[in-house]
Amino acid sequence: MEIQRNKKKPRKGAAMVAVVEAEGASQDKGDLPLSPGVMDEASRVLGNYDLLKEILLSLGLHIPLVHGTLVCKRWLHIIANPEFLGRFGKLHLPRLLASYVSTMSGCHMLVPSQGLPTEFVSILSRAKDYFSDLEKNWCSDDFDVLDWCNGQVLISVENSIMDFQHRLAICTPLNPTKDFTFIPHRQLDVPQGYIKMDIYDFFYEKGPSKYILGLDLVSMSLFIIDLPNGLEHSNPEMLQLSQEEDSKLYIFHLNGLKLHIWFHDINNTGNTSNWVLIDTISFLEVFGHIANPSWDSEVDIKIARGGNSGDFIYLHVDDDVYLVHIKKRMVEKVFDNGKVFRVHPFMMAWPPTFTKKIMMGNILK
């Protein structure tokens, strides 16, 4: 998508007109001759602050929105407003761009999601180049991707330069100019029978059998959340946690050929067991022609990774890995005929970060 600006300075009092070339549109890339009547109509529309906000909210894709900040200072101030970004983020959830797969043999690859708009091709290309350079600088056995959140990747590195000591670092594939940020080593003792899980500003441990122990990292206070009635977490491949940024917790529970998704609002401190079953999926229906009658007794299905917001989940089906889009009831194969060690979702980073130079108006005149 391109944003073109008229090189001529607009007349006083008139709104700047940005010509946005949508995918598939055929327009002359030169200056478009606009009649005074069209200019006046555009000025009335784009000059209305509330109407302009609604127009920008309807853009749909995140990349055109960021491009819109380059039109003029007024557009930048609207788009960079946290309230506007919050509304846009809820209307247009960040997309799953790709899946990062690590195999037992030490192979790493970034698998693009199916049906992505062309606007995201350059983002994936930069990310692939980043990890290619990472493998050149660190042999595949020297690093491992542990987690991926909002454009930042937590990795574990180990080689002779570090005396073969494990170090944790954060890297940013979408901003390759930034160096690794190494994390000071701290050993956290986890009691026997607990499984630790870090999510955003909370630290969770699935305690013995029937509850979740949480630690608020801001207030350093502990809290307990009971699991839904009848659920136990003796096997992490059958039950996993996931969370939205606004303190909403999800549980993925695999029960035979069915997947149950439970929802809990962490902010509801008065009730530690207010779980709601929000969805149930039958794999025989969702997988369609991929499934076969032998699945009832022979197929080996395990949870590989739960997605954000309960929107998707990765499943091990025998030796293959599938991505299941829960709301869309769609399935796509991520990796086949191999032992996958880990799989991580590569999400579109949100909200966008605007450089200090842009925010101070050194570029926009």
Image: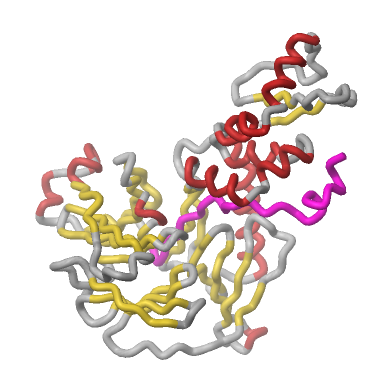
Q: In this image, 212 relative to 144: left or right?
A: left
- Residue at image point 64% right, 31% down: 52
Q: In this image, 153 relative to 291: left or right?
A: right
Say above or below: 138 vs 219. above
User: For residue 80: magenta?
Assistant: no
Say above or below: 131 vs 273. above
Magenta span covers which residues? Answer: 340-365
Give the tally of numbered discs: 0
Q: In this image, 113 relative to 16: left or right?
A: left
Where's the N terminus, which quadrant?
top right
- Residue at image point 62% right, 66% down: 171
- Residue at image point 70% right, 59% down: 176
User: For residue 361: magenta?
Assistant: yes
Say above or below: 222 vs 295. below
- Residue at image point 27% right, 85% down: 193
Q: Quadrant of residue 317?
A: bottom left
